[in-house]
Amino acid sequence: MDTKQKILLEALRLFSQRGYDAVSVEQIAAAVGIKAPSLYKHYKSKQDIFHAIFDETARRYDEFTDTISVHVNNSEEDAKTFEEITEDDLVEKVKALISYSLHDEYVSRFRRMMTIEQYRSKELSDLYSQRYVHQIHNYHTELFGKMIAAGVLAEEDPCILAMMYDAPILVLLGECDRHPEKEEECRKKLEAHVRLFYRTFNSRRKG
Amino acid sequence: MDTKQKILLEALRLFSQRGYDAVSVEQIAAAVGIKAPSLYKHYKSKQDIFHAIFDETARRYDEFTDTISVHVNNSEEDAKTFEEITEDDLVEKVKALISYSLHDEYVSRFRRMMTIEQYRSKELSDLYSQRYVHQIHNYHTELFGKMIAAGVLAEEDPCILAMMYDAPILVLLGECDRHPEKEEECRKKLEAHVRLFYRTFNSRRKG
DNA sequence: GTCTATATCCAGATAGAC
DNA sequence: GTCTATCTGGATATAGAC
């Protein structure tokens, strides 16, 4: 009875590997374990499956940003604790975000699919930028702004600071999407990056 | 007689917008101004066009790295001048790279196509990483290593420094590919980023 | 080297039995 | 809700005239 859900997950898996056009409904059906016509009892078209993936992902995304707001949302709450945050705390925070982004079936597959389909329409371009660039960037811009105001971060443009902090995360995430076997290597680079950033811009630093 | 070249350029344009599978040979032919069957006098199949694009781009890429080695290649030559390079020089250098990457028809279209097709095979994943991540990263790692040795850059891991410097360039390039109208905004952010990086890690800095 | 006509194939989708 | 059989359209590719 959760065939409907299984269709979404398998379609997403296939779309994230080869893109929407390269995947046939027959292949999706085969992955689910049924024949292609049976699939039309659950969704009225291939496009309908595509759209359902977006709805489902939006739902999960809202859930995520609501519950685990620690990662991306509400820098107001974080700002207080960030005044006393250690370098290790920052590292753990980023590692948690990476683990979730790489290993949640839905999240990782959807990101790959979006990477493939991002130029298909203005809506998709906007969604990609919003979800994978601006969201995390705006969060850090706001957060760093408050940390600067609190005197714990060097007085630089928080937007540029955030970009310097964010961009390596996004690039390493992309690298892991292409080469999953490099996850450990990327994690190490990411950690080194966060530590360098912290040591460099923390205004209480010694050297 | 350069219909053959025009086919490549138009196919690349279409592939870079919608991806290989979503583009029909009829659409390519129409863009060139001929009928689909005529196209088979120049290339024996659609796949053949795809491969020709790679060959042509590889050729242009080699040309580029040979002639304009200033941008990406041969950090040995650059290292000497970099000891005396100004902040403005650095900014101009990056702006030139961005202008070329965004406005050269072949380069920009091919990058977008690669972004769409990067997961199709290990070969494509490797090529993407090599050309759009590692190449520029290795260059800056080497360069920064020499600048550190020369005493003009802070003594940090050159690999991580390079990532901090590179990643924002890659992310902003991606943003411009999705939203060409934001080029000016991205250029400004990029300049601010380069200046912040320079001021922060230049070991002759005052504050 | 371009065209029209056509062969061939396969994908998305529907009909209707079970 | 699954299946088999089938319709239909569109895509790659070829044949052969000009």
Image (cartoon, coloured by chain):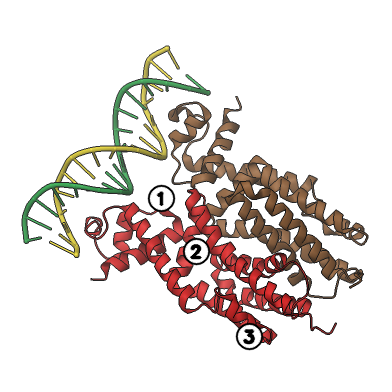
Chain colours: A brown, B red, C yellow, D green
Left or right? Give the position of A126 relative to A22.
right
Label 2 residue SS: helix
Disc 1 marks which residue? B21
For the C terminus of chain A, the image quarter is: bottom right
Q: Which residue is drawn at 46% across and 75% down?
A: B66
First reached walking from the N terminus: tag 2 or tag 3: 3
Q: Tell me which chain the residue with mark 1 is part of.
A: B
Determine contact: label 2, label 1, CB under 8 Å: no
Determine contact: label 2, label 3, CB under 8 Å: no
Q: Nearer the viewer, mark 2 or mark 3?
A: 3
Determine contact: label 3, label 1, CB under 8 Å: no
Q: Label 3 amino acid? A: Thr
What is the spatial separation of the Cα atoms under label 2 and label 3, in whole angstroms? 30 Å
Residue B197: x %, y % from top left: 73, 75
User: What is the count of numbered marks?
Assistant: 3
Disc 3 marks which residue? B81
Task: Please tell me how crowded label 3 is: few (under 14), some (14-19), or many (20+) other residues with Cα within 10 Å.
Answer: few
Task: Please tell me how crowded label 2 is: few (under 14), some (14-19), or many (20+) other residues with Cα within 10 Å.
Answer: many
For the N terminus of chain A, the image quarter is: top right
Residue B111 image label: 2
User: Which residue is nearer to you in this view: B131 or B174?
Assistant: B131
Where on the picture, by quarter, is residue A147? bottom right
Residue under disc 2 on the same chain as residue under disc 3 = yes
User: Which residue is nearer to you in this view: A111 or A200?
Assistant: A200
Where on the picture, by quarter, is residue B144? bottom right
Label 3 residue SS: helix
User: Which residue is nearer to you in this view: B202 or B27?
Assistant: B202
Q: Tell me which chain the residue with mark 2 is part of.
A: B
